[in-house]
């Protein structure tokens, strides 16, 4: 089946904001994620804000993946190179496949907008499928910037959601 012929997927997604300072009131990035995906017919089933703590982040992501209702988990924050940026280290051990092209394309697109600062992003996309008693799920780690999230979702993730979900179903 050609990619353009795939049925439209309706994805249940979770948002995990990793931050020591953001609150429900001040979190603009979570709103951007929700708005962009829900406009496409997808549904946010849970949104949480978690401190920059590797074990807390990893435990929460595992719980979300074990959930029967979540097919996609998007994190925002903790993808840079600072001491508190531990989201990648928390998520990486949960992945069975990493889709390197996502991070490469994201940094290329970001470079066009913000210049060489883009090289500090460790944003990525992968599939979690090796966790006991879990179905495969898409994990997407994005920066904390609302503009970066909008770029990643509108140019990369949203155009490929149908294909990603179809591939997960083939597992």
Image (cartoon, helix red, strand yellow):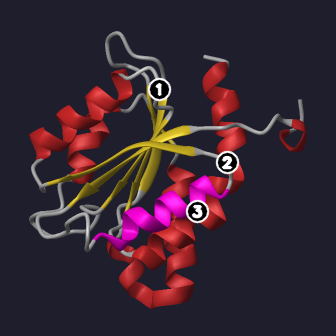
Residue at far front of view? 25
Magenta region, residue range:
27-39
Res. 36 mark: 3
Secondary structure at numbered mark 3: helix
Tag 1 residue: 69
Residue at the (61%, 45%) spot, across then down: 42
- Pointers 3 and 2 in contact (C-beta within 8 Å): no
Residue 162 screen position, x and y as percent: 71, 40
Q: As rendered, which of 21 and 3 lies closer to the eye?
A: 21
Mark-to-mark CA distance, 1 and 3:
20 Å
> Residue 50, relative to residue 119: is it above or below?
above
Residue 48 screen position, x and y as percent: 27, 49
Position of 160 with respect to 144 (left or right) is: right
> Residue 63, relative to residue 122: is it above or below?
above
The tag earlier along the polypeptide, 3 or 2, is: 3
| Main secondary-structure element of the magenta-colored stretch | helix
Residue at the (30%, 69%) spot, across then down: 27
Residue 130 screen position, x and y as percent: 37, 19
The tag earlier along the polypeptide, 2 or 1, is: 2
State which quarter of the image contains the N terminus.
Answer: top right
Res. 146 mark: none
Q: Residues within 10 Å of mark 1 (few under 14, many from 20)?
A: few
Instruction: State yes or no: residue 63 in magenta.
Output: no
Q: Residues within 10 Å of mark 3 (few under 14, many from 20)?
A: some
Query: Which quarter of the figure has residue 68?
Result: top left
Res. 41 mark: 2
> Residue 25, relative to residue 89: is it above or below?
below
Q: As rendered, which of 26 and 83 lies closer to the eye?
A: 26
Position of 3 with respect to 80 (left or right) is: right
Mark-to-mark CA distance, 2 and 1:
15 Å
Instruction: State yes or no: residue 28 in magenta.
Output: yes
Q: Residues within 10 Å of mark 2 (few under 14, many from 20)?
A: few
């Amino acid at each position: 089946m050609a990619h353009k012929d795939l049925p439209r997927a309706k994805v249940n997604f979770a948002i995990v904001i990793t931050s020591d300072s953001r609150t429900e009131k001040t979190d603009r990035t979570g709103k951007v994620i929700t708005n962009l995906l829900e406009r496409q017919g997808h549904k946010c089933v849970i949104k949480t804000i978690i401190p920059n703590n590797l074990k807390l982040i990893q435990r929460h992501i595992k719980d979300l993946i074990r959930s029967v209702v979540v097919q996609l988990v998007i994190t925002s924050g903790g993808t840079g190179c600072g001491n508190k940026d531990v989201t990648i280290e928390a998520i990486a051990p949960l992945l069975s496949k990493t889709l390197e092209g996502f991070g490469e394309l994201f940094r290329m697109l970001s470079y066009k907008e913000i210049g060489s600062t883009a090289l500090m992003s460790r944003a990525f996309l992968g599939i979690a499928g090796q966790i006991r008693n879990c179905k495969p799920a898409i994990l997407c780690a994005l920066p904390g910037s609302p503009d970066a999230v909008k770029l990643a979702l509108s140019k990369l993730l949203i155009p490929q959601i149908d294909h990603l979900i179809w591939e997960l179903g083939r597992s």
